[in-house]
Amino acid sequence: MSITRRNFVKTSIAAAGTAVTAGLVGCGGGGGQGEGSQQAGGVVEITIPSYKTGENVGAVFFEPQVERFNEKYADKYHITLESVPQDGFNDRLKQLAQQNQLPVLVQGGDIDWQTDIAFPQGLAYDISGWLNDHPEVKDLVLDDALAYCTNDDGTVYSMPLPTVRPTGYYWNTAMWDPQVDLSTLSMDELLAEIGDQKIAFSTAENGWVCSLFLTALVAAEEGGADWLRGGVEEKIVDFNQPAFISAVTTLQQLLQNNAAPNSVGATYADAENAFLSSQAAIISNGPWMSSSLDEANSANWSNGFDGANVHAALWPGQMGIANTSSLGEWWISAAASDEEKQLAEDFLAFVYSPEEIEAFLLAEGGDAPKLTYSENFKEEQAKTQTLADLSADTTAETEFVPCILDMIPASVANSDFGRELPQLANGTYTPEQFAQALTDAAQEASLA
């Protein structure tokens, strides 16, 4: 499946370049002419705006990774990180594009902006030739990701991902210790087993934890998984579907009967805190949460919580929440100089090396299906219980279903979904009314 589905390649690059010179973003700037890009003493230096800095959870791995790159290429390259708050990151990239100041290496950005504006208007460098010349890198990327990122004319702008991090759920065995093999249960059986146990939810921001539970509930309904996957081709704008309404009915019951204290209005950080303070026995999250369960982070635990008591699993039916047909994390500015493009390509080769991929998986969890793991990696992974749990559940039989937030218009995912959840939780909305509210918002967004 190619991202030409979004009119990714509407015109030739030459035609696009002509259009851009009079439009919103320009091809004449950025890269070497952009902010923080210079050469000093033969060392090519660039600045990358990133939200994976400071207190952001992604900084735990990403900042040291950039330091390792700088050390490896100390006599050739240097990357400086510009700290940008995550909630303002997409706007920061758009602002830089408007000013012809895109960084050499661009860390993603709003998906719609990438596919509808940045890429069609020639702001990205085609890495297809580089990928073909580096099979040691290309052979590691996910097949679905490569297909998705490859356009009908063979160009590739977004670097395909080599890893998948399926989201499941975690439980504290000190509070809930089921004596059955959870992997054999259906969704109805799992919910019955959970009974009245408390679940950590979040409804503020984008309602992240609720969105994960809802995704799993939709996928368990007849036709639900295919309905979610349909959003890869065209964003979902009609929620008046039996699978969705049935799943929302269950979510409403969980919010009313099982939600941990203060779940309504909770941010993700609040939901995680509820789990780490033994106010909830269960939370849904990705494998990156494993780091929060490590003894090194025990300062964030309270009320007798112990990360050693936590286990994790994928959802019933060996279902993991992950979108393998997606853009990657990185792309390169088309306006970068040749030296800067070389730096960017060497950076991508570095982060896609087996050693860095394994380090990433140990830090944030997940799997690299096409990488042959080293013995040291397998030994280290086994030391983290939840990573070992999720890895054991991720097999050739695992079914991946994209998170619902990725399959709906960005404005609905980022604001409307979370804003409407409290009204579902307090009973102001019926499941049907909740579905209609999202439908109205999505259809309005699609016309914008």
Image (cartoon, rainbow, N blue to C red):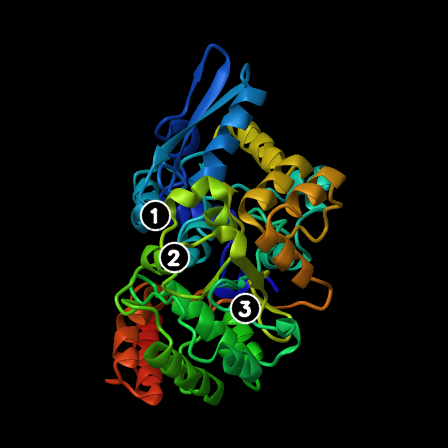
The local secondary structure at tag 2 comes to helix
- Residue that numbered label 2 is attached to: 272
Please give left or right for residue 76 compared with residue 79 in the image.
right
Please give left or right for residue 174 compared with residue 159 in the image.
left
Which x, y percent locates residue 66? 50, 30
What is the three-letter code of the residue carrying label 1?
A: Gln
Which x, y percent locates residue 307? 49, 52
Residue in view at x 66 percent, y 54 percent: 142
- Residue that numbered label 1 is attached to: 86
Up-down: is 48 above or below 242?
above
Which x, y percent locates residue 336? 47, 32
The quadrant where residue 36 appears: top left
Residue in view at x 52 percent, y 58 percent: 310
Report the quarter where the N terminus lies: bottom right
The local secondary structure at tag 1 comes to helix
Q: Which mark is residue 177?
A: 3
| Viewer-side residue, 35 vs 179 | 179
What is the three-letter code of the residue carrying label 2?
A: Glu
Please give left or right for residue 365 compared with residue 296 in the image.
right
Could one spot residue 327 in this view of the protein? no
| Viewer-side residue, 230 vs 433 | 433
